[in-house]
Amino acid sequence: MKAPARFWDFNKDISGCGVFGVLHKKRGPIGGDMPIKAMCTMHDRGNGQGGGFAAYGIYPEFKDCYAFHMLCETQEGLDNAEAVIKTFFDIKESQPIPTRRTLAIKNPPIVWRFFLTPKADRPKWKDATEADYIVSVVMHINKDVKDAFVLSSGKDMGAFKGVGFPEDIADFFRLDEYKGYIWTGHNRFPTNSQAWWGGAHPFTLLDWAIVHNGEISSYGINRRYLAQHDYLCTLHTDTEVVAYLLDMLTRKHKLSLRMASYIFAPPFWDEIDRMPLAQQEAFRALRMVYGPAMLNGPFAILVTNNTTMMGLNDRVKLRPLLVAEKDDMVFMSSEESSIREVQRDLDRIWAPKAGEPVIAEVEA
Amino acid sequence: MAADSRFVLNAEGLYYKQLNEQIRAAVRSGHKAIELCNVRGQRYIGNSLDGEDIDIVIHGVPGQDMAAFMRGPHLTVYGNAQDGVGNTMDAGEIVIHGMVGDVLGYAMRGGRIFVKGDAGYRCGIHMKAYMEKFPVLVIGGKAGDFLGEYMAGGAIILLGMFSDKPAEVPITGRSLGTGMHGGVIYVRGEVPAHQLGAGLAAKELDADERAFLEVQIRDYAAALGLDAEAILDAPFLRVKPYTHRPYGNMYVGTN
């Protein structure tokens, strides 16, 4: 490569994604301003091509309804999605997601939310569990309804994301007006997939949400494996597979989150060889049965659901991740500075071992 | 120099470009002793800064790539540092009173970095030495995997003493010194054989190596206010390649 002209004055984007998460163990209210400020500190980890947040505990008045956050490229897309939703659900509330006109966000798509309960008399998937029913409808809309995507589908939670820096996306979605007990945030530096609103993080299914710094090099294998289990990838970003794999492993196959993390980032074979015999057998079985669910490539991910936040690195730690505690709050982030920005004094801060999950849970 | 005579810059709310412009302006106008307060995540502090008489004290958490390409200055961090400290650093000294993130001292070619606590993954990789240039990295806590990977020169000293990690966590990680073909890694305590990269041996120190280690540890302890004798009062091992040029025949046979 030829050096650029005026190479001494050459401005290059030097980035990697940034993730931040906070969980309040007693479900105390955390204002949106905290994750927004934390993400601002890591502004330069992204390049304005994607930002997003997941928030839990934000819809107490509809906590028994599935909150569908919709992203629609056209009004027709939203109308068609609504027609599908009406077939499968009773709509308790239908409203635009409140937004603010901001200079930074140009030509946003239509964002809408529905609060839903499944129809008592289901037109399809009658024998499926309720969760499977929801997943089936989400997959159906994302695959078959043109220009309409379900951004999140859990209870008392929601994903807010789009193309822009995270602070601009937060401004657009007025996230400073929400309070939740778990938040995650993401600043995107897209490397090998397109930048579009659906492709920003977090990726969600039911109440799972994933934010990710890195690349899932095994995307092709993971995606084909998921297709065999009726999960369809429609959002053109590698991280999507993590949300669906988690749902499959933990909800359908009843594995713990810790077990799922050992499938995502398994110990090396030589490490397994040095384990006690019973452990060797367990880890060999996991690697053999779930080989296609292993995540290859660099990653630091934050995984959340209504009660939990988990941080996990790839097994050779090609991306940074810090975990900190202060009283009832647990923080996870790409950079310590973002945690210090919102919480100056910490009880404890550490960098977890590669491939070793850190799981924080709300109390009962 | 007394602390109150330092030129103080408040980094609160400053974008990294503004902060670094202010540091450079201060240096240009003749300030040798500078203090940075409320640093939280500002990148590139001290990058390419030139001059052995510059002394910067940092309060807070400096951001990525602190002191990259730095030549000469002395930096002290009261707090933890993030990833990429001392990237391709040429000369000078960095003292960190907390822990550091990943890729500390990447391709470092001179100067010294003293870290009190734990260090992350891939520290000291591609370190090199030439003529009078001899980089030294001292880590008081434990280190992550790939310490000294592809190391070509200089010294890494790993103590495993001032760590926040549980006692059962090994001092070094896996793939210690993988691809190493020069330089030396000193470890206070044991090095499990399975953690050693190919072609490396962990052996006891000879008299010259012990003398070198003692000098470095005394400087380290003095910089961080620690007891040098307590640090030295334990067996050390040194990790080096078996042979002078372990990869000499890798691509083209020479004998």
Image (cartoon, coloured by chain):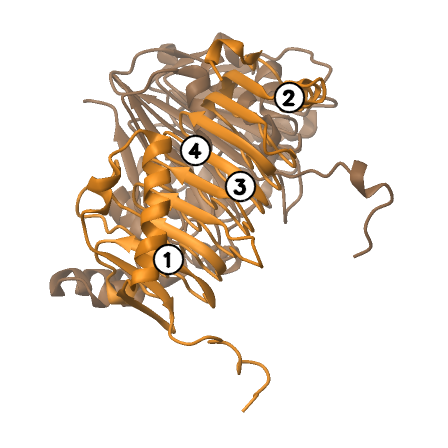
Q: Give the vertical position of B58 relative to A228 (above or below).
A: above
- Looking at the rendered structure, the kind of residue marked 3 is Gly
Q: Earlier in the sequence, mark 4 or mark 1?
A: 4
- Looking at the rendered structure, the kind of residue marked 2 is Ile
The answer as to whether the residues below labels 3 and 4 share one chain is yes
- Looking at the rendered structure, the kind of residue marked 1 is Ile
Q: Secondary structure at mark 1?
A: strand
What is the distance, in whole Å, between disc 3 and disc 1 at their CAs?
18 Å
Q: Give the vertical position of A347 relative to B103 (above or below).
A: above
Q: Which residue is mark 1?
A: B185
Q: Which residue is mark 3?
A: B86
Tag 3 near tag 2, CB within 8 Å? no
Of circles 3 and 4, which is in front?
Answer: 4
Q: Earlier in the sequence, mark 3 or mark 2?
A: 2
Q: Chain of mark 1?
A: B
Instruction: Find the residue positioned furthest to the right.
Output: A5
Percent x, y of residue B97: 37, 29
Q: Secondary structure at mark 4?
A: strand
Q: Which residue is mark 2?
A: B23
Q: Which residue is mark 4?
A: B95
Tag 2 near tag 4, CB within 8 Å? no
Q: Earlier in the sequence, mark 3 or mark 1?
A: 3
